[in-house]
Amino acid sequence: MFVPCFYREPEASWTVDLVRRNPLAQLASSGADGDPPYVTHVPIIVDPELSEDLEDLTGTTLWGHMNRANPHWAALVDGSRVVATFTGPHGYVSPTVYGTTPAAPTWNFTAVHVHGTVRKVGSDEETLETVTATVRTFEERFGAEWAMRDSLDYFRRILVGVGAYRIDVSRVDGMFKLSQEQSPDVRERVRRSFAERDTTHHRDIAALMGRLTPNGDH
């Protein structure tokens, strides 16, 4: 991913936070014998054993799973390189908020590309651990802490159709395009315009912009 220097994440922890808050990723890997690349939307979590205070994803492991009926599963080979892309809050910026002329519209967005190598999970128990860890993570962060114990037998019955894997992370690229190229007063007007919107992702952009200093640093 091409990331101009002024759009790079202020701190590596910003990429960790984005991945944890936006876990529906696009997993991409090469096709075989000149076939097009495979791209699949999948839930991916950070290794649940790692601390909530994790500062950097490089060198860590991500956990994921997909439907074994998906041709992408058969195409995944242990040790092959993959990229998982995570999209954070984003939104259109109209020149009407700038208060200056000339001006051009743009789209503010946040994204993280995680590069690594894939390892398929072999055992049913490790696959079940992947599924339950994913459920636990999502329930704690997004749900109502649903107790899955009464559904574990059901989980075991459907494991035959689940392929679990690990991604050993080698590189992380983060792009946080938050109007850093604008003057502080214009950037503040953009931030306010997002903060005043009703949608959560717009307010999330405003919150991230509020964490930037006038120089664009954390």
Image (spheres, rainbow, N blue to C red):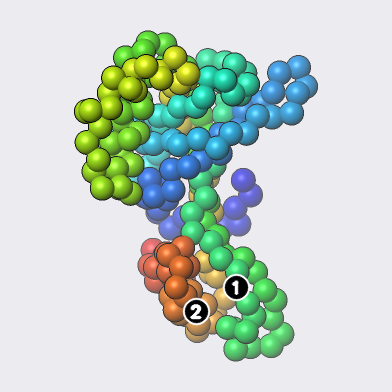
Question: Crowding near pointer 2: few (<14 within 10 Å), some, many (20+)?
Answer: some
Percent position of residue 72, x then y: 61, 24
- Label at residue 93: 1
- Does residue 67 sit above or below 204 in this rendering? above
Q: Where's the C terminus, which quadrant?
A: bottom left
In the rendered structure, the answer to whether residue 81 lies left or right of residue 104 reads: left
Residue 98 rendering spot, x and y as whole percentages: 59, 83
Residue depicted at x 66% and y 26%: 30
Residue 90, compared with residue 101, is above or below; it is above
Residue appearing at x 43%, y 35% in the figure = 44
Closer to the camera in the image, 16 or 25: 25
Kindly identify which residue carries mark 2.
193
Q: Are marks 1 and 2 in contact (CB under 8 Å)?
A: yes
Mark 1, Cα crowd under 10 Å, few <14 / some 14-19 / many 20+, is: some
Q: Is residue 111 above or below residue 59?
A: below
Who comes first in sequence, dot 1 or dot 2? 1
Question: How far from the left and from the top, in percent, is residue 133?
Answer: 31, 31
Image position, residue 193 (x, y; %):
50, 79
Q: Nearer the viewer, residue 170 or 22?
A: 22
Residue in view at x 39 percent, y 36 percent: 45
